[in-house]
Image (cartoon, rainbow, N blue to C red):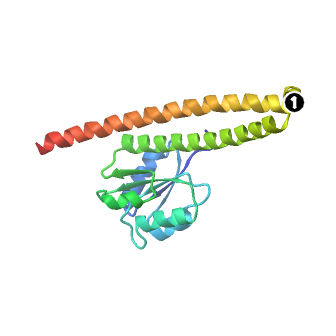
Amino acid sequence: MSDDPTEVLVVEDNTELASLYASWLGEEWRVHTVADGASAITAVTEATDIVVLDRRLPGRSGDEVLEQIRADGYACQVVIVTAVEPDFEIIEMGFDDYLVKPVDRATLNRCLTRLEHRMAYDRELREYYAQVSKKAILEARKSRAELASSDEYTDLAECVDEQAARADELLDDLLSDATNHSQLFHRLLGRDAAVSN
């Protein structure tokens, strides 16, 4: 992962809640807040890594903000944090995670950590495949003797091996996150089933 702090934009019209989220996240992430959809659209930049987005906003709704973020080509991760219960319309929405309010500090931090791991894995995988492509091109066009005598090729081959190991570590983190997320989800479902019986 990069040494730069992750840029998080909190889009929440309840200013007390926005401040609470910012205080929960401020120690680990660089957090900015806006209170309406129009401000959110102008606040998202290439530097924005994660958007924490409410669906019910004054002016442009969170759904419209999400559509605009994706239409503008921003690759940031978006987590919906809202009181709106999810329905089948979420299938077509371009978010990365969905949390239903009320949300506690631990849940929000776990969610953002999970999204941060996904971003790191995506970056590492892109770089890995770029280097693998270069290696494959050279191997297809150069003789074994030429490859063996090239310091650049040797460095590239070592880099590919190192990146494969880093990608594997990040994938292990993601799988661990997914397992923990799934276990939490099943525990919540178990509680809901117990309450409804």
- Out of 123 and 153, give the one closest to the viewer: 153
Tell me if residue 2 can be seen.
no
x, y percent for residue 63: 41, 65
Residue at disc 1, secondary structure: loop
Mark 1 sits on what residue? 150
x, y percent for residue 136: 74, 37
Q: Quadrant of the C terminus?
A: top left
Of all residues, the one furthest to the left in this rendering is: 197
Image: 174 above or below 52: above
Q: Quadrant of residue 134?
A: top right
x, y percent for residue 55: 38, 62
x, y percent for residue 193: 17, 41
Identify the amino acid type marked 1.
Ser
Number of numbered tags placed on the structure image:
1
Q: Quadrant of the N terminus?
A: top right
Within 10 Å of the Cα at label 1, are there few (<14), some (14-19), or many (20+) other Cα atoms?
Answer: few
Query: Looking at the image, which residue is at 36% across and 50% down?
Result: 99
Of all residues, the one furthest to the bottom in this rendering is: 59
Query: Looking at the image, which residue is at 30% across and 58% down?
Result: 87
Query: Looking at the image, which residue is at 57% across and 30% down?
Result: 168
Query: Looking at the image, which residue is at 42% across and 37% down?
Result: 178
Q: Is residue 116 left or right of residue 144?
A: left
Tell me if residue 175 can be seen.
yes
Q: Quadrant of residue 92?
A: bottom left
